[in-house]
Amino acid sequence: MKDLFPDTADELEIGEIAYQDTMIDTVNAIIKKYDHNPTRLMDILIDTQSEFGYIPPPIVAQISRTLNISIVDIEQTLSFYHFFSAKPTGKYTIYLNNSVIANMMGREEVARTLEREAGCKFGDVSADGLIGLFSTSCIGMSDQEPAALINGKVFTRLTPFRVKEIIRDLKAGKRLDEAVVEGLGDGANAQPEIRSMVQNNIRKKGPILADGYKAGEALKKIVKMKPEDVIAEVKLSNIRGRGGAGFPTGMKWEICRNAPGEEKYIFCNADEGEPGTFKDRVILTEYPKMLMEGMAVAGYAVGAKKGILYVRYEYTYLQQHLESIIEGGRKKNYLGKNICGKEGFDFDIRIQFGAGAYVCGEESALIESAEGKRGEPRDRPPFPVESGYLEKPTIVNNVETLCSIVKIINHGAPWYRSMGTKESSGTKLLSISGDCKYPGVYEIEWGFSVNDVLEMVGASDVQAVQVGGPSGTLIGPNEFNRTLSYTDLSTGGSLIIFDKRRDLLKDVVMNFLNFFIDESCGSCSTCRNIPVFLRQKLEKILNARGVQKDIEEMLEWSKILKASRCGLGLTAANPVVTSIKNFRSLYDKKIQHGKDYDSNFDMLIAVKESCDAVGRVPQMS
């Protein structure tokens, strides 16, 4: 390939020199926008990728020189995230979701139509450089699949016919917004700052999503309270983190407030990358004021003056909307200096977008990412409440948790504890998708049974339910009487329903294994290797070559993942372990019985992958 930035001007045409100069000038302006701050590397790379469609080595070198950080440090960040590329990705870059739900809803036919109409395969760019096709993990649209991102714009409920129309319009030179013919979505999705076809699909509102919320009421109450009293109220409510881990929120705040140091931070974790989860998307769209207010309440309670809203890259279409809400909060004195007239109550928020990495949902990996690094989880202790962002005490709370805090302040801890169960107080937002009539967001009290949920969403002939996304539990009908709570079936919010048409091993477990393999940061040898081993075993069983010992080995090898240092590694075997536990008969039907090992070994097949990698022709004679 021709060097885009040759060493001598003789190798270039005048137009090429001018383009290179423009690129460098643009990147310098981007770096200046972020005050030449190396910890804002993610923002610099995101803006560069958005501007040019890729980040070539000469631009990396320019960033390195200007920020005085090594090329290696930039490249390791650049190579870590899905949505960064060192090569051109096309004038129109299409990322088609490949989650289990997308596949259930017809992704394969949509993908083949995209390849045919665009004139290139997935992973490539069309010969004219117009269209690039790429697969990506769940983009937070599981209630309206198949879905894709085209230059960051969301297209939902795709069909082969719509694909033909979209590609035809792009080839004809139409603007991307002109390719949208479905109309705009409901609620704020139709506002000028968003203008998206995305639907909220809020099916059931509870106390948190109830109409009548008035921005600023919680702030006006807390400025009359001591910070310690705010924390005491949160502790009394018994609210626990809504992101999945379930750590007591009040205890986390108290530890952070008591941590030494004046500079502290509040992070909102809006990186909902768990396939099947989309409730945070709806809150960011319809309830961002409540979310920002919750962050400010947390800031007051722990003594933090700065908040960072970390949002997954797939939701960049909401950026202008969120920025306008933040600016509106400043104008009303709900953010900024001396909030609500309280001397010394200073708190402001900035948005930090990710760039496509599921592991950044883990709080320490999220902090690493916000500092401009690879999203690799940190060794703990110390925990973020002691040493987090920029090594300062840091609170990381989920979107739903922070919204719940506002309602707790407004209505009181006893009110909140009156809902749910003794051990699991309050309500839970569920993202429900898959084989049901009414996919969407439901707010229920903790203690609902799975059967209650299935009846509520119009699901029938149900074979299995995935509770908590791929990292959760796959249960069968004999467990549908179990309750959603921290003491029984805990979940960050995702429930995926599978009816009896679905092949659970091939369509579900294999998809989840591929997801964990793709999303592993690779730091731990356990997480880097064991899921690949499990996939190989599952492939063997699906190809009718497995034996009883293969199933037992899958369970034994899965135990090794418990040595991983973050939640991704710890739960990466859950699809295999829970499916064997609850659907063992599906495995038993596919293996060879009466055999201790597979006697149909084929050396040519066994060595094919290694030979292909090094360009050898196997010699078996």
Image: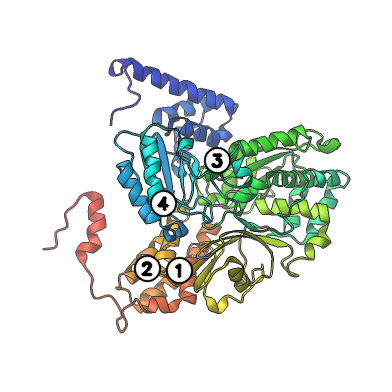
Q: Which residue is mark 1?
A: 576
Q: Nearer the viewer, mark 1 or mark 3?
A: 3
Q: Nearer the viewer, residue 320 or 145?
A: 145
* Quadrant in the picture for residue 61: top left
The numbered dot on residue 538 is: 2
Left or right: 53 in relation to 68: left
Looking at the picture, does residue 132 appear above or below residue 270? above
Q: CA distance from mark 2 to mark 4?
A: 31 Å
The residue drawn where x is 51% and y is 31% is 69
Q: CA distance from mark 1 to mark 4?
A: 32 Å
Of mark 3 and mark 2, the one earlier in the sequence is 3
Evaluate if marks 1 and 2 touch, with contact meaning CB atoms under 8 Å apart.
yes
x and y, in percent, of residue 116 in the image:
30, 46
Hey, which residue is sitting farthest left in the picture? 621
Q: CA distance from mark 1 to mark 3?
A: 33 Å
Q: Which residue is mark 4?
A: 159
Q: Which residue is mark 3?
A: 316
Disc 2 residue type?
A: Leu
Q: Does residue 598 appear anywhere in the picture?
A: yes
Q: Nearer the viewer, residue 392 or 363?
A: 363
Q: Secondary structure at mark 3?
A: helix
